[in-house]
Image: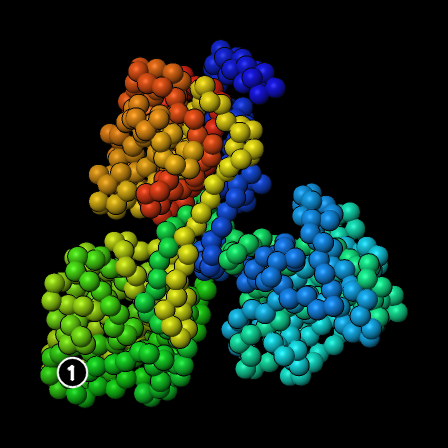
Amino acid sequence: MAKNLQAGLRQSIKASRKAGVTGAGIFSLAPLDLRFALQKTLDPRVTFTRASTGTFVGSDGVLQSAVTNLLLRSEEFDNASWTKSNASVSANSAAAPNGTTTADSLIENSSVSVQHFAQQLVTVAANTLHTVSVFVKANTRSIVRFGLLNNILTSGAFAHFNAATGVISTQTTAGTATSVSYSIEPYANGWYRCRVSCVIDALSATASMFIGLVDDSNNATYTGNGTSGLFLWGAQLEQSSTAGEYIPTTSTINSAPRFDHNPTTGESLGLLVEEARTNSVTNNTMVGAVAGTPGTLPTGWGTFVSPTGLTRTIVGIGTVNGINYIDVRFSGTPSSTGEITLYLSPATTATLAQAWTSTAWLSLAGGSTSNIGVVNLRNFELNSGAYVREIGTSFVSSISSDFVRRQNITTSFGASANQIQLVLSIYATAAGTPIDITLRIGLPQLEQGAFATSVIPTTTATATRAADVASITGTAFSSFYNQTEGTVFADINTAPVANIAQGVFDLNEGVGSERIFQRRNSGGQIATAITDNGVVQGDFGSVSVPASGRARSGFAYRLNDFESAVNGSSNGTDTSGTVPTPDRINIGQNFGSGQVVNGTIRRLTYWPTRLANTTLQAITAP
């Protein structure tokens, strides 16, 4: 069948060429066409994971956090992550809402006058609104007692959900729980998604997701018969007021893919794929800040003022477009010239030759830059707390009321230093001349790396955003891939960074000897390489990524017949080489190299036939 499909595709492409369709019309013939920027969703063939939450810009320009499932083994209730009491689980007992046979059956035992349930304990943010949800289908039992409680089951909220009628009954708010709400949503084939939202109490940092069986008389405590139960699938716990899209988990938490947008124009940019990064600013969301004169800076921040005669005022704290900010005013008549410094983070360990990038949203929220020589975002290099030197970027000539993200890069950490610290500094240029400036500062970030990545919110400690991992494997891959010949097309956005390679796609077999892979290399060009049995068959790379960072590239292969094209031009041909045998494709990352696109994939397309050179150049044209 696959051969017939490929033959039919070749005939369709030949007919399209005769009709003059050599560009966009060819895409309609591709069996794999991942249009991330247009559809803003994942094809079901794509496997995606990120073991943490992550931020992205929505189409409305607002910074958002991706849905993150804090539970483990969300479809494996038989796993030890779920504690069973007077109950057992029969795995993979029924078809789940997604059509796979992955739904489990929760079965009561025959114990007398007890509750029959499963639960999972999870670390959560205290005094914070969370939502739990689970898919339920009636079997020999139809009612589930479901909710979110603290770890000793004394505070929280739960209700009885009837998976035969879609009715919620016996709604209970226990202890000091607040912001309680419930819902039940019908799905196909008798499935319902049950939801409970609440703040469990003011102190608990551990929550229990509780799923219990209820007898036909609506009793949660009863004598079981040893056989009755109901079907479960897709449990989720998230820090939210509603149930978001379901995100499956295994041995780690998982988060939804991020489809990013231009914050100014709202343009959809596609699937955001980034490497792991840690924000060393321990509190960039302004926790602990209080308005006043002088007011209270966010916890962990500090101030150093060299000239006397100045007053510091915390004008206000708020959020704009999802960005937490603080307005800090310095006013008065300085006794001398000198620097006013805000410490935005504690010192963090750094080593020789590391690259560090600091960012923050900044704007002039009031006053002016009169008698201000610089407004600098700076990285202080320290030796065991003692100042060594500073590297900074001045914004005094460009700072305005526009609240934009500024960047400062330290590309070569000094030999005499072992710590780095993010600061914002203002320099008074004349003694006896008044100054009055209010700066708005939002979500500062200090991360090890030669370029900035998406913001990582913090409250009391450093936080790490895990790497985005997207791939197609197994039968999902073999259903479209042609070993004999084929063509790959990619449309990406990535900020070109000197001396850093950024992966685009990698067809490989999980070892690295059989590969067709593409990257933006450290010299700034789109490069494609093909390896068979560990031997390089072709290496193409001479077209630079434009300053905008957007590149459209394609690669066509067949025995002794390769071509690469970038932005409408040939990137090289080769008439000698064999074809490798991959069994998967990594999206936005090269196999085993750590080379991540650190940008967005707008579109990724595959044809199981070798497109003509003219067609390849046409589809990659800007």
- Residue at image x 40%, y 75%? 460
Q: Is residue 305 above or below residue 76?
A: below
Q: Is residue 97 above or below residue 399?
A: above
- Tell me the quadrant of the picture where the N terminus can be found: top right
Q: Residue furthest top?
A: 18
Q: Amino acid at mark 1?
A: Ser
Where is residue 468? Give x, y as percent: 43, 50
Along the line of sight, which residue is nearer the eye, 438 or 425?
425
Left or right: residue 558 compared with residue 380: right
Question: Is residue 156 at least partly visible in the picture?
Answer: yes
- Tell me the quadrant of the picture where the C terminus can be found: top left
Where is residue 545? Give x, y as percent: 28, 37
Residue 75, picture quadrant: bottom right
- Residue at image x 44%, y 19%? 485
Q: Is residue 14 above or below residue 345?
A: above
- Residue at image x 31%, y 78%? 301
Where is residue 265? Give x, y as percent: 42, 50
Residue 308, picture quadrant: bottom left
Question: Is residue 569 at least partly visible in the picture?
Answer: no
Q: Which residue is mark 1?
A: 306
